[in-house]
Image: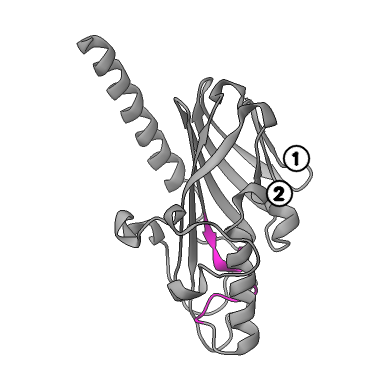
Amino acid sequence: MFKCFALTAAVLAAFFVSQNLWAQTQPAHEHGAARLNVSIENDEVEIRLQGPLASFISFEHRPTTEAQINEVRDMAFKLNQPETLFIFPKEAACQLKELYLSADNIDREHLYVQSGQTLANNHHRDDRDHNRDDHDHDHDDGDHNGHDHGDHGEHGELTASYEFKCQDYSAVNSIELALFKIFPNLSVVRVQSSGLKGQRAFELKSDSPSIKW
């Protein structure tokens, strides 16, 4: 039993080391790109989506107009419907357990919007459960990758975390991403996955939007 525990701990340690090394090789703040970590363990699937706000909306500074606030709320409404973002095989019967959203320069009240059918409150994880270091990135002034920040000169990072429970996790042999259709500013998603068939790192684009194991 001790050997089994030690082996599990070693595998987890190797995974987290590889995640850190992989993250360090990725551009710190690349508009049009996002990072996606997918972990499958037992009957749970955890997905964490991170990237510049400009990959999801047209600006990164704090919204100052009604139009900008509405754009943020539209983004938040889409992020609050993970069943449309991540499509699992039906036979896996995966259901959302928990959801967490945060974004630089965006008030929390704008991230959990009530529009139509929304998630139950108990799906929303408290901010205190997450380390704010998730948003570590370079904050250079001015334009970045051709994106105009206007007079604000601010960068903003989005984090969306989802935890699913699946009745048959062995059936999770693929996850189709609808992110490219739902967020047109997004052009590439860099994936780090860990599950039944080991660890992988690869890129997805709009013409190849599926994670397959």
Q: Position of residue 184 (x, y in %)?
A: 73, 62
| Placement of 97 over or under 56, stated as above or below | above
> 141 left or right of 174?
left
> 118 left or right of 139?
right
- Going 54% across and 75% down the picture, which residue do you hit? 60
Q: What element carries label 2?
A: loop
| Placement of 83 over or under 44, stated as above or below | below
Q: Position of residue 150 (x, y in %)?
A: 58, 86
What residue span does the magenta drawing correspond to? Answer: 50-62
Viewer-closest of 184 and 153: 184
- Which residue is under mark 1? 208
Q: Which of the colour schemes (rainbow, by chain, secondary structure, one colour) is used?
A: one colour
Q: Is mark 1 on a helix, strand or loop?
A: loop
Q: Within 10 angstroms of label 1, few (less than 14), some, or many (20 or more) residues?
A: few
Viewer-closest of 183 and 97: 97
- Mark yes or no: residue 106 visible: no
Determine if the magenta segment contains residue 181: no
Numbered circle sitting on residue 178:
2
- Going 23% across and 9% down the picture, which residue do you hit? 1
